[in-house]
Amino acid sequence: MFTSRLEISPLCWLRAFAIVVLFAAASNAQAVLAQQAAVEVQELNAVRVLAKDDTKKADEPKSDKSGKSSEKIPRAFDRNRPEPEEEVEAPKKNAMVNFAMDPDRWADVIYSQLGGAEATFEQQQRRRVRSTLNRIELICTIDEQIREKVQATAELEIQRFKTEVLALAAQGPRNPTQDEYSEFYNKVFKLTERYRMQNQPNGTRKMPLWQKVLFSNLSEQHKQELEKDNQKRAEYRQQIVRLEVLQRVSRRLGLSAKQRDKLEPYTLSNTEAWKTLEQAWATLQQFPEKEKRDIFTPEQIQELKKPLEQSDDLQLVIREFGDDL
């Protein structure tokens, strides 16, 4: 029986081995080329990023050389985090003043003791000077030079007081306690006392400098005429006060016009007893019974025996009359 046998020569084996080796070498070369290409691409991207950063830095304004730099946002991976800033403790508030007093507010406090703000104080002083000069002009003639001198003295006095207010306000405590506020308020009271006293009667108030200049330039005859006029004004003020007290007594007891006419002579005979409602009420209670029956009705006499209550609606403060009345 015939058997066929395939025989492969050694040369064929060598050729096959060479082909396999060449194929493996080609695959390795392609992988190396691909890896080099990837590295080049990464380097190119890095170069582009650096170029963009340089462009942004060139466009940004140059930072100050004094050490001030833009604050960096702290991130979780930062090793050196910025230390937290210490918070300044707010000043403690107290029961008397619950805000920080500055010089402007202290100046407002000072002028408020005189009835308003700084502009109000100036207007009041200038109006007082004008009214006094105009009143004296109705009695005696004042030279124009004297008028100008008095007005200039008044302006000088106003400016001096404003300077004293600013100096005192600068010394005021910024966050005062109750004791500090009371102590400083006493200084404010002393500074404004002489201007508050100008609204008091002539016997108790202090004469301002401009009035001293005015009266020192008047003749003796003019001074006597002014004194007579002042006495008439004082009598008129007292008369108005007595009539006001009598009217309040009339409303309290329900007096008629005839009864008020009977009581009016008593107000002239004892003027001191009719300055206030309390004094007048006590004086009426001490009237003899015969005089009470001649003036009042039995119901009014019974009402007069009752004490004057402090809560009475008629318990009003008598108006303070100035020199302009």
Image (cartoon, grey):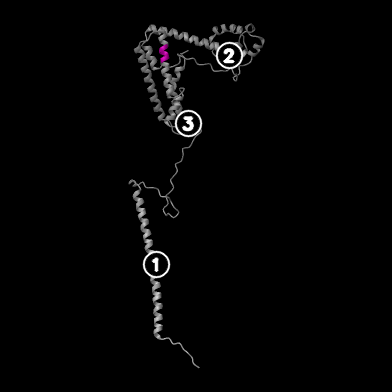
Q: Residue furthest front?
A: 2
| Image coords of residue 133 (percent x, y) | 40, 13
Q: Earlier in the sequence, mark 2 or mark 1?
A: 1
Q: Secondary structure at mark 3?
A: helix
Magenta segment range? Answer: 130-134
Q: Secondary structure at mark 2?
A: helix
The residue to which callout 2 is attached is: 248
Query: What residue sits 58% from the left and 13% below the top?
Result: 248
Amino acid type for the residue under numbered disc 1: Ala
Q: Quadrant of residue 103?
A: top left
Query: What residue sits 64% from the left and 11% below the top?
Result: 300
| Image coords of residue 178 (percent x, y) | 49, 31
Q: Residue 179 got which mark?
A: 3
Please state which of residues 231 and 99 is positioned toward the viewer in this rendering.
99
Q: Residue 34 got which mark?
A: 1
Amino acid type for the residue under numbered disc 2: Arg
Q: Residue furthest left?
A: 65
The dominant secondary structure in magenta is helix
Q: Residues within 10 Å of mark 1 (few under 14, many from 20)?
A: few
